[in-house]
Amino acid sequence: MSEPDIADSAEKPSGLRDNPRYEGQKKAKTGPNAALQQNPGSDQLQSESHSIRRRRQLRELAKFHARDIIAFKVNKKLAEQAAIAATNAAQQAILTEKRKLDFADLVDSDFDLSWVLGCERFRFKHKTEPTIQPTAVHLVAQYHKQEDIRYNNPLEPFEYQLGNKTYTVAPIIRNRKQLKAIPSTYPLLVNNRPPQASLLAIVRDAAARLPDNVGTRSDVALLMLDSAYIAPGVT
């Protein structure tokens, strides 16, 4: 036996010197993949790094989809709000158009006030100056009697008959529940008066008695003094 054979047989453990499997294991340890076989933890590190990268990618993808979902919901909500606003604007425009009244259709020859500019009654008069004379005493007495009938029947229209002239006024109230109302205290009106004898109703009756249905503020105030429900001393 030569010297190399003696050395090889000396390295073999007892019982494995003639085992071919032992020879294969020895060749594998000395082959080109010996470094990988001697360090089995490298495969585990590579697998863990791949898993970490994969989880990172999944998180980024989830964030991207979440942003898309949020943007979609926000855009959908904004679109719904814009649609509601557009619908409301369209409805408001329709109502406004319906409420618009053509002035030319409402005003006819009976309401033509162009004559006021050349009327002697309003010439050189300011809107705060009276253009009528105070009512005669006997007409004021008639007005008091008819006024009492008018305010005791507030649900019905009424016609004042003063001399040879007639003045028509609308009902004071339209709801029977207002008949039980208590008259409010007002310094310009007497306290002992019907509940419906308000300052607004007296102003309306005075405006209805304006000559030609036209007058100044002072004209209305002058006709208001004819009412029996104006407090004494009011001028």
Image (tube, helix red, strand yellow):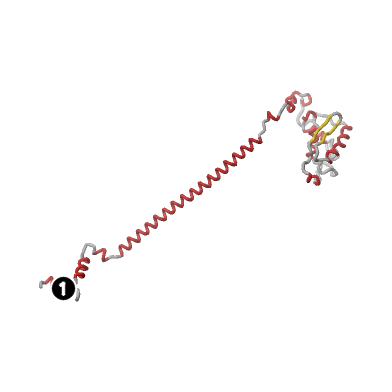
Q: Position of residue 56 (x, y in %)?
A: 39, 56
The residue shown at (37%, 59%) is 52
Q: Quadrant of residue 114?
A: top right
Report the amino acid beneath label 1. Ser
Residue extending farthest bottom: 14
Q: Quadrant of residue 112?
A: top right
Q: Position of residue 161 (x, y in %)?
A: 85, 32
On screen, residue 199 versus residue 88, left or right, reads right
Q: Position of residue 39 (x, y in %)?
A: 28, 65
On screen, residue 39 versus residue 92, left or right, reads left
Q: Secondary structure at mark 1?
A: helix
The residue shown at (55%, 43%) is 83
Q: Where is the N terminus found, in terms of image quarters?
A: bottom left
Q: Position of residue 235 (x, y in %)?
A: 83, 36
Please tell me which residue lies in front, 96 or 3.
96
> Is residue 129 at all visible to an observer of this figure?
yes
Please tell me which residue lies in front, 135 or 205.
205
The residue where tag 1 is placed is: 9
> Is residue 188 at all visible to an observer of this figure?
no
**Count of numbered marks:** 1
Q: Quadrant of residue 115?
A: top right
Above-or-below relation of 54 to 11 = above
On screen, residue 189 versus residue 51, left or right, reads right
> Label 1 crowding class (10 Å Cα cut-off): few <14, some 14-19, many 20+?
some
